[in-house]
Amino acid sequence: MIVEAATQARSAHVIVVGNEKGGSGKSTVAMHIAIALIKSGQRVVTIDLDTRQKSFTHYIENRRAWAKRVARDLEIPDHICIGRVSYPTAEDEAAGCKALADAVETFKCSSSFVVIDTPGHDGYLTRHAHSLADTLITPLNDSFVDFDVLGTVDPETFGVSGTSHYSQMVEEARGRRYLLDHVTPDWVVLRNRLSMLGSRNRRLVGEGLQALSLMYNFRCIDGLAERVIFREFFPRGLTAVDDLDEITLGTRPTMSHVSARREMQMLLSAMRFGSAISDEMLGQKRDAA
């Protein structure tokens, strides 16, 4: 189990959420993982590397403000936002990567998990973060437009015809990590915005991901369906794993909240975080719902 290994080594497990394409749900996934881990009793530090959008940072700020507004004690991780230089020199890059590595090492001594959210574009901090990952999570919208960051397909057969920039970058980062301490990060690809119904596109994208997973040794699991409820969580900093009563939620819970919670429960279980996120915690309020 991941949590047991982290405890024995007295060093935090580093989870990096990355994809070089925006709009794939990175910040939503990162936030849900962080809050679920805190609720299970783990100490979690979160790092936002996207200093332009700051979606992860804003999500946490919204949560802090909403908790104060409704007078509820919502779990909030220790959080920092690490900047980047727009046009860095080699010295700037080296200094930035050292700052990130130093921050991770500092937090690894005092925390159980470090969750890092990366921007939707390439950059020296993004590449360095990937090389620090113990677990890499790549949310991917279920379309060939998003599939393109991982691989190319034949336009006639839709079979995989090659690899793309992001998968190549991940392979390089995993190689650097292996040379450093003989650890190969676990890579998990999440298929987000899944259609509620089966479709030809869903089947073809799934077949393509299966082929790529054999080439790059990643696990592919179903992520989040296209649910409006996940977008509505953001302004209040809430997650599907929160105890969403009427006061905390700000409105009466609906079946959409129940469905989102069950979906997130299955997702977190499939990520294999082991006893770090207990079934009891994920299933709270299930009977009441």
Image (cartoon, rainbow, N blue to C red):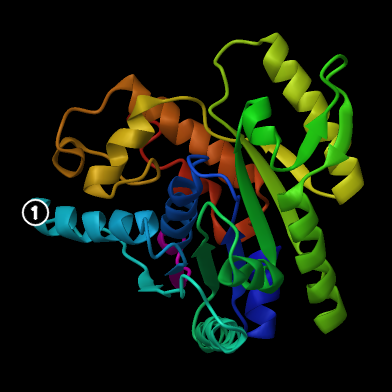
Which residue lies at the image location 65% right of the left edge and 67% below the top edge?
127
Q: Residue 167: x and y, percent?
A: 76, 51
The magenta segment is 38-46
> For this view, does 191 lie left or right of residue 35?
right
Quarter where residue 124 is shown: bottom right
Circle 1 sits in a helix, a strand or a loop, which is it? helix
Q: Which residue is mark 1?
A: 69
For the N terminus, the quadrant is: bottom right
How dense is the environment of label 1, judged by Cα within 10 Å: few (below 14), some, or many (20 and up)?
few
> For this view, does 135 lie left or right of residue 64?
right
For the C terminus, the quadrant is: top left
Which residue lies at the image location 51% right of the left edge and 26% below the top edge?
225
Quarter where residue 50 is shown: bottom left
Q: Residue 15: x and y, percent?
A: 60, 64
Which residue lies at the image location 54% right of the left edge and 75% below the top edge?
112
> For this view, does 279 lie left or right of residue 189?
left
Is the residue 128 above or below the residue 139 in the image?
A: below
Q: Residue 72: x and y, percent?
A: 16, 55
Q: Amino acid at mark 1?
A: Arg
> For this view, does 263 lie left or right of residue 227?
right
Is 241 colored magenta in this rendering?
Answer: no
Which residue lies at the image location 37% right of the left edge and 35% below the top edge?
230
112 or 48, nearer to the observer: 48
Is the residue 67 above or below the residue 178 in the image?
A: above
Q: Residue 113: x and y, percent?
A: 54, 71
154 or 67, nearer to the observer: 154
**What is the tally of numbered marks visible in this picture?**
1
